[in-house]
Amino acid sequence: MSIVDRWHATRAGALWHSSIGKKAVMAITGAALLLYVVVHMLSNLKFFLGPESLDGYGHWLRSIAAGALGYEGFVWMVRVGLLACVILHGVAAVQLARRARRARPDRYRTRTRVADGYAVRTMRWGGVILALFIVYHILDLTTGTLNPHGVHGEIHANVRADFDRWYVVLAYTVSVVALGFHIRHGLWSALQSLGAAGREQRTLRRIALGGAVFVCAGFLSIPFAVITGLS
Amino acid sequence: MKVNLRIWRQADADQRGELCSYEVGGVSEDMSFLEVLDTLNASLVARGDDPVAFDHDCREGICGACGMMINGVAHGPRRATTACQLHMREFRDGATITVEPWRAKAFPVVKDLVVDRSAFDTIIQAGGYVTAPTGSAPDANAVPVPKHDADDAFTAAACIGCGACVAACPNGSATLFTAAKVAHLAKLPQGQPERYSRVVDMVAEHDAQGFGGCTNTGECTAVCPKGIGFDVIGVLNRDLLTATLKRQAR
Ligand code: FES
């Protein structure tokens, strides 16, 4: 038995090998990332409670289980987990996209889409936009390299310095809207890929739309409050 | 009425094809789309030209032989309707209609609008059956089946294997076809003993035939002439994942 056969004989290998299994991997990693995004969005709202609240929260996050893991130990565990999810999600997406290309080498000369919407058609490129945004976002607010203020621990001031600039607000808005579209199709699609979507498809689609709007509104409330001078 | 047809002409799998324009007059709105192709072919033959090759058999929407992209939509503009049951009243007088074959790696063009759909047969051979000898049709209700299971199985079994789902899918996936066949048997008592080996084998064959993966776009169910719903794909996914987990436990 070769190494490849042995890998396919395992549960994980069999899952990864099949087109449906890969979708399940995308669904589970996507769900983990979505959970993170929702927590991130909700904690962002501490911005409205002032610098002590937001900066204090940042410090508190880093000191979770500091006794056992050291300062920032917990944060690093989460980061490694997120990175693993992003890699699995992205690799499966690229492999499935390439498989789809191979499945139709000769394009239609006339093509009319009858069912899918904007969210469905932008999943792949939207995902690329999100990946680029994540890189920028880390360099901006995690390392502070690209941040106009860029002082470690002064989260509130860094965010405010960002959103005083219209082009940062624009880039951020485009990315958050891309995230919204990704969630709108992705959340529903994940439930379908895991076999959870039965007859209640309409309800599930509505939940996905509601979730997307909720996440977008939460993330966008901060830049718009800053740039309009409301906060 | 009169229509302008732009039809894909391709001599065989190895030749390059192209769209050719034909004007067809004397079209009645009660004619089916295939009858317009018949009319065109009669005039092509009379001129000594090669008629347009297309698949058809029952012409009453039950065999699944016919199928072509009509203006970029599998089986044309009317929902839940095969090309043979599509009537010309769906089109305006003087309309230009583009007709292409199903396009997928696993469905090579044989000639013009005819494609080789043997890949579907191969997927069925991989597990779309029950191995128990069933003899002649059993008495009704000899095996009790709950009403909603019977309904679901019947709806899934309505698949005629025409290939429209593959043709419409942006990923060139045959997931709806495979799912209909899996769901049909998964809902019935006769299908239970081989339920999980069936789904693994059929999905493996689906992938091996070079079909793409499903991204839940819903294009397939929108064009399915039998109106097979997206829920069968949920059954397929659930059974495949269950089977994958079970295999290790065995
Ligand atoms: S010819 Fe039989 S379904 Fe159209």
Image (cartoon, rainbow, N blue to C red):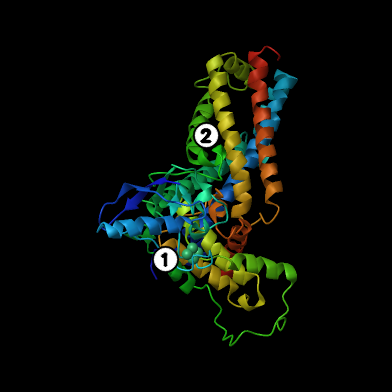
Q: Residue at x 61, y 36 (%)?
A: A75
Residue topped by disc 2: A130
Q: Residues within 10 Å of mark 2 (few under 14, many from 20)?
A: many
Q: Residue at x 44, y 70 (%)?
A: B121
Q: Position of residue A231 (x, y in %)?
A: 70, 15
CB atoms of marks 1 and 2 within 8 Å: no
**Measured along the vertical axis of the image, is residue B169 above or below residue B12?**
above
Is residue A123 visible in the rendered image? The answer is yes
Apparent side of residue A109 relative to residue B198 in the rendered image (left or right): left
Q: For residue A216, which quarter of the picture?
A: top right
Q: How many marks?
A: 2
Q: Secondary structure at mark 1?
A: helix
User: B134 or A57, which lies in front?
Assistant: B134
Q: Secondary structure at mark 2?
A: helix
User: B119 or B37, which lies in front?
Assistant: B37
Is residue A65 visible in the rendered image? The answer is no
Q: Residue at x 52, y 72 (%)?
A: B128
Q: Position of residue A219 (x, y in %)?
A: 65, 28
Residue topped by disc 1: B119
**Measured along the vertical axis of the image, is residue A81 above or below residue B167?**
above
Q: Residue at x 52, y 62 (%)?
A: B177
Q: Position of residue B189 (x, y in %)?
A: 66, 76
Q: Position of residue B144 (x, y in %)?
A: 73, 79
**Measured Cα–Cα span from mark 1 to mark 2:** 37 Å
Q: Residues within 10 Å of mark 1 (few under 14, many from 20)?
A: some
Do discs 1 and 2 belong to a common subunit? no
- Residue type for callout 2: Leu
- Residue type for callout 1: Ala
**Measured along the vertical axis of the image, is residue B190 above or below residue B201?**
below
Name the chain letter of the residue that bears numbered label 2: A
User: A83 or B139, which lies in front?
Assistant: B139
